[in-house]
Amino acid sequence: MRLSQIMTRVPRPFDPEKGQDIAAAAPGIDPQMSELLAGAAGASPYLAGLILKEADWLGGAVEDPAAAVCREIAAAQDHPAEGLADRLRQAKRRVALMTALADLGGAWPLEQVTQALTDLADAACQAALRAAVLNQIRRGKLPGMAQDDAQDAAGMVVLAMGKMGAGELNYSSDIDLICLFDETRFDPGDFQEARAAFGRATRAMCATLSEITGQGYVFRTDLRLRPDPSVTPVCIAMEAAEQYYESLGRTWERAAYIKARPAAGDKTAGERFLETLRPFVWRRHLDFAAIQDAHDMRLAIREHKGLGGPITLPAHNMKLGRGGIREIEFFTQTRQLIAGGRDPDLRCRGTVAGLSVLAGKGWVEPEVAAALTDHYRAHRTVEHRLQMVRDAQTHSLPKSDEGFARLAAMMDRDVAALQQDLSRRLAAVHELTEGFFAPSRSAPVEKGTALDDTILNRWVRYPALRSARSRQIFERVKPDLLARLGATARPQEALVAFDGFLSGLPAGVQLFSLLEANPQLTDLVIDITGTSPALAQYLSRNASVFDAVIAGDFFSDWPGQSALERLLRAALDREHDYEKRLDSTRRWYKEWRFRIGVHLLRGLVTPQDAGAQYSDLARTVLAVLWPIVTDQFARKHGDPPGRGAVVVGMGSLGAGTLTASSDLDLIVIYDPLEVEVSDGKKPLTTRLYYARLTQSLITALSAPMAEGKLFEVDMRLRPSGNQGPVATSWTSFQSYQREQAWVWEHLALTRAQVVAGPDDLACDVEAFRRELIRAPRAAADVLAEVAKMRARIQQAKPAGSLWEVKVGPGRLQEIELLAQAGALLAGAQTAETGTGLAAAARMGLLTVADANLLGDAAALFSRVHTAVRLLTDKPLSDDGFQPAAEAFLTQASGTDEINALEGRLAQSYIACNDVLCRVLAPYEQQGEVP
């Protein structure tokens, strides 16, 4: 489409006479185009010169400006080495002229203008690099390389950084490049020669682009973003660059790599390099410490450039000054750095695109993102007009009235209105961004707040406050923290609890930065430390779990196991290394485990809900990890022989009643069919294969790694216990359960559930379990075994404190045994204690009243057990709790006060023990326990 047909505005000629003269020099131009040319030439000496120089080309190009620009870019990229420098300069003149006219005429939006300039820069770099590398190959300076290797620059890549990387080049921008080469394409002995040749090629490429000749220049190049530019060669090996970033990389370099993009040369190698840097750029945890780093960079730039004063329009720097373009870019990039490690959707290069996705993900308010986007486009438009005047790399507003008059003419605006709009936009950007980087501080603690100075004074000696940076951040957080501690019902006790948490915190920068950016989290920390020592200790060792609180859906409804499996698989799909997948699983699990604990602590879920959620979480981990463990094992030893293996959850996992500190009772059952040996590179006999595969699962779950461990695993419920094989074949499992199993093993099967493995084998195992439970058996034999087991457990594990509700006479474990017996004798397919007791009552094993008493007590004991395990994973004494813990226990148990709960527990133990003794007394002299 013709340019004149899509124009929406025309600049006023600042010098009308000159504008008319220049427009008349362009042949075959219609009146609308002539007006645009006159306005452009009358306001910009640079554009006037381009129009005169490219007048013949311009007449045809305006018929379809986008196509004309694309043709110029393609021709420049494909041009041979001979005459390349002049051809690139001609392409630059033509693309610069057409983008300026399309921009001034309102035919192209900002993004199309900047993308066209970026596409030209990519093409110019590709052509210049190809010619430079080809010259080195022809001279025999790149060992082992032939002329065809010049197409991908023999392993060298040019990374476009900054605005070029993001497709946002401004009108008179230099281009920030990092040049690397893939050292793996050369023999070690040829490394030094190859590095020297690539250095020469880099300098030749830059000279082709940036030298000013009679035809002009293409782009000014800047190579200073490479690692340690004062001492490193202009083109460095990828391995050396990777080592630098891993050991010495700084936050500003992380921010720079948000926009990094392979632009020329071996782009495949460039993409691989960027992938290796992904952990450096995108931290796994929310990185609120980046806010202070970015703020320090902003202040350093202002100080270095002398731009720290108030906003005044004359000579104000639209890029680096207050309220300028860089403020918006830093705001966007810092938000991306904070959360991009967790959410790949945030890893976009463009500023406008970044603001959009940040708003969509809830990291920036939509109104703020929309306002900053509007201001960004307006700022960039003004920047382009300033640069178009004389093709100068300037970002500063005019100093004189004449300069402002010229700028207003280019924008076809009144000078006063333009200045008013500029002032308003600069002030608005500064206001929107400054609060993020330098938020207002909390008011000091009121003098009436009484907190123990001896505790406060020792904080500086704690590991979390060892570094100067952590102390600086903590000093900013401390007033708000102390104010919130002082506002609790018992400030001194809250302080003591928080002190215990702080003393165990190994490092503080990330957590203190997070609290500074999100003060509301301080209340949650105080709640946790004052109520649950176990959760507080867990938090001190895993402060990154707070990431989930910030993520937005932390307090939403529980998603269920199916949704959890999708989320975990999506998280693991982003990792390809086996150990990284195990660590990612640990991080993911810790965040969800913390979520359940916080919900329970705050009364958002009941203890029963929490038990079901802990169980969902464990089943999810097993369902997702088991195939990954199997695939990893199969790489060496071949695919699982036969139908594979299933993992069966027993005990609390099978019953769906896990607590915060439960281990996992598991059985592994495999069906080899008739396969005797696996078919991998290192084949194993079937029995050994599945034994080692099971050990691999145990290791994957329980081995300490960088992110800790997932679960302790208990395999003692497998056939023959510790004397039996760690994995059991399907045929052996069936024959053992039919012919050799003890009654207690059948009782355990009432709570068994297949949690991972192939569906067909899982269905067979479940069908067999149901058949086994339905089998008729003598009540006397089963109850005799229960009586013997009860006696043996009481002898081996005496009752603990009042709060140890699980083990002891009349407590939860004994009630569950009787419930399992009722389910087994009734052939009931249930793992629920109340249902099992009801089945026992229907069979006449106990009265309905006794069943109800035991059922109500079991429900109470279960609630208390789940709550206590959140408070601590150690045995509790009867000495009492902190007030916050007492309040939590009474809320979780449904009682009014702690004394009433203690009395109710003591009475329930006695009453339940009486019932159990009465029911089992007739059978105590019968049966046999292994």
Image (cartoon, rainbow, N blue to C red):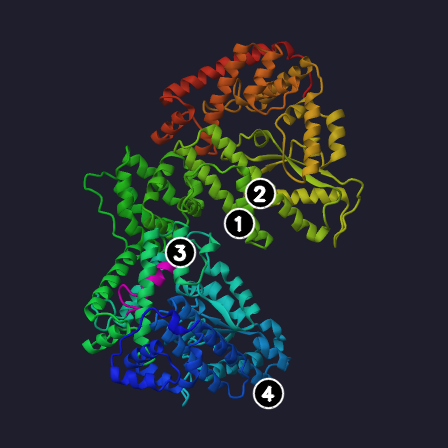
**For mark 1, what is the residue?**
571
Residue 474 placed where, x, y %?
31, 51
- Neighbor class of circle 2 (other Cα within 10 Å; few <14, some 14-19, many 20+) is some
Mark 3 vs mark 4: which is more N-terminal? 4
Mark 1 vs mark 4: which is more N-terminal? 4
Q: Looking at the image, can residue 804 be seen? A: no
Find out whether residue 605 is within the magenta segment: no
Q: Give the distance between the C-alpha atoms of the residues marked 3 and 1, in whole angstroms.
A: 23 Å
Task: Give, as a three-letter code, the residue at label 3.
Answer: Ser
Find out whether residue 331 is within the magenta segment: yes
User: For residue 356, which numbered disc appears in the image?
Assistant: 3
Residue 653 placed where, x, y %?
57, 32
**For mark 2, what is the residue?**
702
Mark 3 and mark 2 residues within 8 Å of each other at the beta carbon: no
Mark 1 and mark 4 residues within 8 Å of each other at the beta carbon: no
Q: Is residue 347 left or right of residue 723?
A: left
Mark 3 and mark 4 residues within 8 Å of each other at the beta carbon: no
Q: Is residue 669 left or right of residue 108?
A: right
Which range is magenta? 318-335
Q: Is mark 3 on a helix, strand or loop?
A: helix
Image height check: is 16 above or below 892? below
Q: Is mark 2 on a helix, strand or loop?
A: helix
Q: What element carries label 1?
A: helix
Q: Nearer the viewer, mark 3 or mark 2?
A: 3
Q: Give the distance between the C-alpha atoms of the residues marked 4 and 2, in whole angstroms.
A: 59 Å
Residue 542 placed where, x, y %?
45, 46
Q: Is the magenta stretch mostly helix, strand or loop?
A: helix
Mark 3 vs mark 1: which is more N-terminal? 3
